[in-house]
Amino acid sequence: MVDSIEKIVSLAKRRGFVFLSSEIYGGFGSCYDFGPLGVEMKNNIKKSWWQEMVRQRGDIVGLDSAILMSSKIWQASGHLTAGFADELVECKKCHKRFRSDEISRSKAKNQKSKCPECGGALTKPKKFNLMMKTYVGPLEDEASITYLRAETCQGIYVNFKNVLQTMRLKIPFGIAQIGKAFRNEITPGNFIYRTREFEQMEMQWFCSPKDADKFFDYWKKERLNWYLNLGIEKKHLRFREVKKSELAHYAKRAVDIEYKFPFGSSRSGGEAGWREIEGIHNRGDWDLSNHSKHSGEDLKYEGYFPYIIETSAGVDRTLFAFLCSAFTEVKGGRTKTTKSVKEVETVLKLHKRLAPIKVAVLPLVKNNPEIVKKAKEVYDVLKSHFMCQYDEVGSIGRRYRRADEVGVPFAITVDFDSLKKNDVTIRDRDTMKQKRVKIKDLILCLGKQL
Ligand code: GAP
């Protein structure tokens, strides 16, 4: 587990996981771009979630709804009115802005709130809506205003009837969706933890009101297990019951899954580091009843509005948590190139399913044309089966080290014996153990382990 956010930011930039958006123009509004390794890892997270939440179940179906929707949806959902606003305060001296819940949390009891940056006096809190406004069509008037979606689930609610009828579903069942969401956050920050553009993986479970509590507990357990099965240690995960006063406008009850990050503290102001990565919400009949009322469409099922249990995870945030949890430093090094007391070697012990590159193919030396040719042949055979990387630059020790740093589970080396015996060595990232395998058996052998 990493001990500082800077180490992750540096690795992410240096090795092509995450770049600052619009970097050559000085960056833009707390948005980030995912580089070649970042996009692979993100896809693996989404694939893993989809596999578990949709493919392996008979009772959840998928959806991909539009980001742009009628602004009436956001009126009905409560996002344009009371619900979806943070309270903002501004320092009268340095003019920095803060969320007032964060200020009140950090100040000692009976102490007047002051600017955490310069100690200046603060303005009274003002409500600030987080929806990102835009215009659809050539005219920029009231009628053409709409909003970039702030949560993916609204697209699910307004398609409830379509999905129910076309798939002939019976309650309880779920609809899952992965997609971009946008929020004009007042205080984005901590790298990709809180950004203005991010991705969500949301599942809405429609059930009878009497079963809502039972399913709430069921989904809490299921979702926690997903993180555990992908390698996050139990001691770095916990549930936090969200206080009544903090509940979102739609929620009857909410539990956050928190991960212990190397920065800050949670909304509860509790122990340092604990921060939300996913929310489990009992949304009651808020969404279906409000959309029924505002659209005039009857969204009841057998005469009642189903309750909704929602699981809502952020792709970017979970990627950040997986990186932090996998980051391992070995003092004194593990490979020949780093066996020095002063040096520290980094190994990203990502779960094999999440690792952006699964196999590195390395010729032992690059000045032997036969070895290079054979290594390229191996790479060509493997690359249509696994995400592979061919690397011939630098000593073999350095190349192992480079592969370890980005979490490649298996490194294959083609050496002099390979030319005679048609076999290679496979090196395991975590144990560093090597074994020889015939080239013809490689796909089967790696396939079993990946
Ligand atoms: N549909 C419910 C919903 O959106 P939320 O607690 O506001 O609930 C769910 O968000 C998850 O989405 C969070 O746990 C987090 O992982 C992710 N998320 C929310 N705001 C985010 C932001 N500004 N940047 C990155 N991820 C965010």
Image (spheres, grey):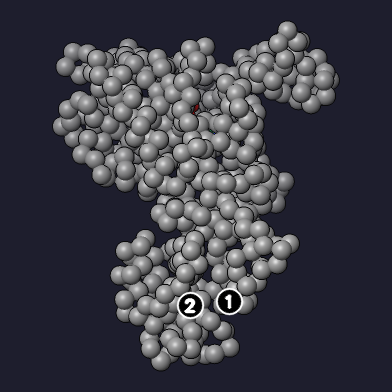
Residue 128 visible in the current orientation: no
Question: Are the residues flagged by discs 1 and 2 in contact, CB closer than 8 Å?
Answer: yes
Expressed as whole percent of the image width and height from the top left, the position of residue 420 reads 41, 92
Would you place residue 105 above or below residue 30 in this image? above
User: Badge 1 local density, few (<14 within 10 Å), some, or many (20+)?
Assistant: many
Residue 301 visible in the current orientation: yes
* Camera-side residue of 408 and 97: 408
Type of the residue with mark 2 = Thr
Expressed as whole percent of the image width and height from the top left, the position of residue 59 reads 22, 35
Label annotation for residue 396 = 1
Instruction: Kindly identify the residue that appears in the image at 65 percent across and 28 percent down.
Output: 187
Instruction: Kindly identify the residue that appears in the image at 50 percent across and 73 percent down.
Output: 390
* Camera-side residue of 113 and 139: 113
* Camera-side residue of 334 and 384: 334
Expressed as whole percent of the image width and height from the top left, the position of residue 423 reads 39, 82
Instruction: Kindly identify the residue that appears in the image at 51 percent across and 76 percent down.
Output: 362
Q: Which residue is mark 2?
A: 413
Secondary structure type for disc 2: strand
Type of the residue with mark 1 = Ile
Q: CA distance from mark 1 to mark 2?
A: 9 Å
Comes first in the chain, label 1 or label 2: 1
